[in-house]
Image: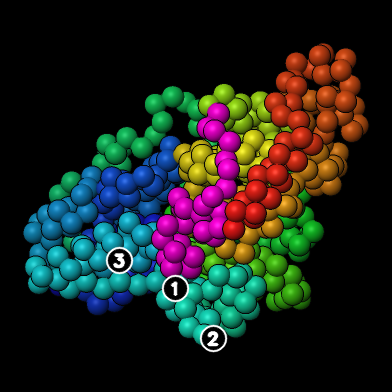
């Protein structure tokens, strides 16, 4: 019999439960990718994500070709495309791995129901998480809203679970069309060549493993100390690979456990596993609280007095011309590479939502378009965490001071100098606060800060106080 494996954000062959089950149970499989961004409405992949997707599909196509198969790529809608493929191939079963975004959950349920009514069997699996959102609940029942107890529970469940190897003997069914040309026809690449700096990335399963082994060799042992230093390559940069399912958290944990055992320092992986725990927490929250990408998780924040939308300020923030060096370095890194260091994400988000008091959704949308790891669950959680409106968020009154943060986490200013060439030669402390020397500032061509950090902080605290008094 023939089965369709409906690839989505699980663009890998190893540890892919849907692919594995299809290959075991059927004589022939069809690997299919249906491109239907309109089914994700406001959260269709942004420009940087589309760039990634293009290359990741090419990589998957190449791995399938090595096994004598190919990727059948079609432009959606999902249900109609799958039905066409079933009619053309006589497939009896559709296999896929589950996703957790509210729109996609709804779409997948509808597709499953319709196919089952057609008499086609549908089987779905978990490929993206250690534990699916409905599989973890508090002692009282119901979802977690606080990270630490969530993680304490999750941590007890992840040892000893082994990933699946890539299926070895593959047999593919013939259907017309598809292949590499069809990937080009999706027009995922930007028309303007702004993605030149993205060449640091190698989308696809092999690229994910390269990144993981590099991290295990070079950075894992110092992760706890280095993960906050943006000038270092101290984190794994696996986020886009994880988002597109080119590697799974099970695979990452198993590999790191093995490496750590070999280097006899098993404890080293704990801080890293905990960060992957945040990713699980984000998915848990999004599934149970599907409005988190647009509405305050904490309803008390609904009455918060955001400043009016300021298009000019927003533009300067996006372009990395705020006049606050660490913030501009981050925004420029984002634009150039599609990625930004986590510590700096917090600082740029804090400047936007607190000092400029622009609504966090505005920043969330910019990140959505520009990050190669744009992920609805993690992005919404990150923005709400910084804005103070999220589950288990930073207390609002803890407003980051970007100058002291910069001095602490980028003491030599190496990160700033890399991304803000106007400040490459700034002497000493001036790299963090160039406005402290008028003559230097004028010479550097770097802008004056667009906002006074002290008074804007006080104004933000005032707005927060007003919110509390309203309650
Ligand atoms: P590492 O430190 O190597 O961590 C390993 C993995 O753990 C990451 O790849 C990621 O999957 C997960 N992880 C780490 N930190 C977090 C976190 N705080 N929340 C959730 N997962 C985490 N992450 C995204 O994947 N997509 C987003 O769209 C996104 N938007 C964010 C927006 C804001 C405002 C903030 C503050 C954070 C956001 N993050 C997002 C979380 C975090 O910044 C990135 O996951 C991390 O920087 C990715 O780099 P890395 O792979 O080197 O991380």
Comparing 453 with 464, the one in front is: 464
Name, please, the residue furthest toward the bottom: 139
Mark 3 or mark 1, whichever is nearer to me: 1
Observer able to see residue 37: yes
Q: Earlier in the sequence, mark 2 or mark 1?
A: 1
Q: Position of residue 277 (x, y in %)?
A: 59, 68
Residue 272 highlighted magenta (yes or no)? no
Mark 2 or mark 1, whichever is nearer to me: 2
Query: Looking at the rendering, in which quadrant would you find the N terminus?
Result: bottom left
Q: Is mark 3 within 8 Å of ligand 1?
A: no
Q: Which residues are magenta?
A: 284-310
Residue at 35 percent across and 66 percent down: it is: 98
**201 horizontally vs 394: left or right:** left
Q: Please tell me how crowded label 1 is: few (under 14), some (14-19), or many (20+) other residues with Cα within 10 Å.
A: some
Observer able to see residue 319: no
Tell me the CA gap for discs 3 and 1: 15 Å
Tell me, yes or no, whether the two marked residues, 3 and 2, touch with CB atoms within 8 Å: no
Tell me, yes or no, whether the two marked residues, 2 and 1, touch with CB atoms within 8 Å: no
Residue at 10 percent across and 64 percent down: it is: 90
Q: Which residue is mark 3?
A: 96
SS for callout 1: loop
**28 horizontally vs 168: left or right:** left
**434 horizontally vs 299: left or right:** right
Tell me the CA gap for discs 3 and 2: 31 Å
Name, please, the residue furthest toward the front: 470
Comparing 462 with 12, the one in front is: 462
Q: Position of residue 365 (x, y in %)?
A: 48, 41
Q: Which residue is mark 1?
A: 132
Comparing 1 with 380, the one in front is: 380
Disc sitting over residue 139 in the figure: 2
């Amino acid at each position: 019999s023939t089965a369709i494996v409906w690839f989505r954000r699980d663009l890998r062959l190893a540890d892919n439960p849907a692919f594995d089950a299809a290959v075991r149970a059927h004589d022939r499989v069809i690997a299919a990718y249906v491109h239907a961004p309109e089914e994700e409405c406001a959260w269709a992949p942004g420009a940087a994500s589309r760039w990634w997707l293009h290359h990741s599909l090419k990589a998957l196509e190449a791995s399938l070709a090595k096994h004598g198969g190919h990727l059948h790529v079609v432009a959606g809608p999902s249900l109609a495309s799958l039905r066409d493929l079933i009619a053309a191939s006589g497939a009896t079963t559709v296999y896929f791995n589950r996703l957790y975004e509210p729109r996609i959950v709804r779409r997948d349920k509808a597709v499953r129901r319709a196919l089952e009514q057609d008499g086609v069997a549908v089987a779905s699996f978990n490929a993206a998480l250690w534990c699916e959102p409905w599989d973890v609940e508090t002692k009282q029942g119901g979802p977690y809203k606080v990270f630490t107890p969530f993680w304490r529970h999750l941590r007890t469940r992840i040892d000893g679970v082994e990933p699946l190897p890539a299926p070895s003997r593959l047999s593919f069914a013939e259907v017309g069309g598809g292949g590499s040309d069809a990937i080009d026809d999706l027009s995922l690449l930007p028309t303007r060549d702004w993605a030149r700096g993205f060449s640091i990335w190698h989308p696809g399963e092999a690229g994910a493993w390269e990144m993981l082994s590099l991290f295990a060799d070079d950075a894992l042992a110092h992760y706890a100390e280095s993960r906050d230093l943006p000038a270092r390559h101290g984190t794994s940069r696996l986020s886009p690979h994880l988002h597109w399912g080119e590697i799974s958290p099970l695979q990452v944990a198993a590999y790191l456990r093995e490496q750590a055992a070999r280097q006899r320092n098993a404890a080293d992986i704990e801080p890293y596993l905990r960060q992957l725990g945040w990713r699980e927490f984000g998915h848990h929250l999004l599934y149970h609280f599907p409005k988190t990408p647009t509405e305050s998780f904490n309803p008390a924040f609904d009455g918060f007095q955001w400043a009016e939308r300021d298009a000019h300020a927003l533009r300067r923030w996006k372009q990395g011309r705020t006049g606050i060096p660490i913030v501009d370095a981050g925004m420029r890194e984002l634009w150039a590479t599609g990625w930004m260091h986590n510590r700096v994400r917090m600082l740029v988000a804090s400047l936007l939502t607190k000092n400029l008091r622009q609504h966090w959704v505005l920043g969330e949308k910019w990140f959505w378009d520009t990050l190669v790891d744009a992920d609805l669950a993690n992005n919404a959680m990150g923005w709400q965490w910084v804005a103070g409106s999220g589950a288990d968020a930073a207390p609002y009154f803890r407003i980051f001071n970007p100058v002291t943060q910069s001095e602490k986490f980028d003491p030599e200013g190496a990160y700033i100098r890399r991304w803000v060439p106007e400040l490459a030669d700034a002497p000493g402390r001036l790299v963090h606060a160039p406005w402290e020397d008028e003559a230097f500032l004028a010479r550097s061509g770097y802008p004056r800060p667009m906002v006074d950090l002290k008074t804007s902080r006080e104004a933000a605290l005032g707005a927060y106080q007003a919110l509390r008094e309203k309650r």
